[in-house]
Image (cartoon, rainbow, N blue to C red):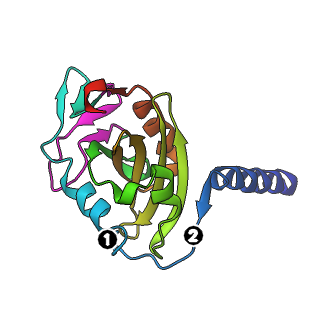
Amino acid sequence: MKKHRLTAVAAACALLTALCGCTDGKSGSSDSSPVSSDLAPVSAEAVTAPQGSADYSDGTYSGEGFSLYADPAIWEYTGGKEDSPCDLQLRSGGGANTCGVSVYISDDDHGGKSAQDIVMNADDERIVYTGALATTALTFYYYEWAIDEEKHGRTYFGDYGDSYICVYAESPNFGYVESKIADLLGGMTLSENSK
């Protein structure tokens, strides 16, 4: 019996190491507000820009310059209701596997930085992780911070001409929902006339 417990513990440690190896951890305090001097334009925009700027019809979620298919069996369109900045909510039954997402175009040029530069050179002690998410549409770079004791927020940036495709997401368990976010963003279509 002890052998099986030891094997289970070793397997869990290996899985945790594999999951954590995908992101670069940053130490620092966990403030509930993602806004700082460097992140203020992005974080403030992440909370306000998606509201009212997206459309949803028969599973197609779209905004200025992009559209993607959000399978109604997996994603529910909430349109930023209930004081949430998220347009889409994962149909997970609640608990640790919930996730909210909004996609939008940011015209802030961040001094001409690439999406990778914005994220990887962000210097804020509240950022707990940075990383990358490759999709068939483009590669996104993200930073993550603690919203509260249970929920974290992420802002993803993808280069899009002189702008950025941005994704704001909230979840208590990004380890579980990251593949769902990747699947969602993988079907994104970009409008050529907006580039």
The residue positioned 35% from the left and 59% from the top of the image is: 110
76 in the magenta segment: yes
The residue singled out by tag 1 in the image is 35
Instruction: Give x and y (percent) for residue 21.
Output: 67, 54
Query: What type is the residue that disc 1 sits on?
Result: Val
The residue singled out by tag 2 in the image is 26
Q: Give the crowd class for mark 2: few <14, some 14-19, many >=20 residues within 10 Å.
A: some
Q: Earlier in the sequence, mark 1 or mark 2?
A: 2
Residue found at the far bottom of this picture: 29
Give the residues in magenta.
67-91
| Label number found at residue 3 | none
The residue positioned 32% from the left and 27% from the top of the image is: 68
Residue sitting nearer the eye, 158 or 112: 112
Label 2 sits on a secondary structure element that is: loop
Residue found at the far front of this picture: 112
The residue positioned 41% from the left and 48% from the top of the image is: 157
Q: Reply above or below: 40 against 116.
A: below
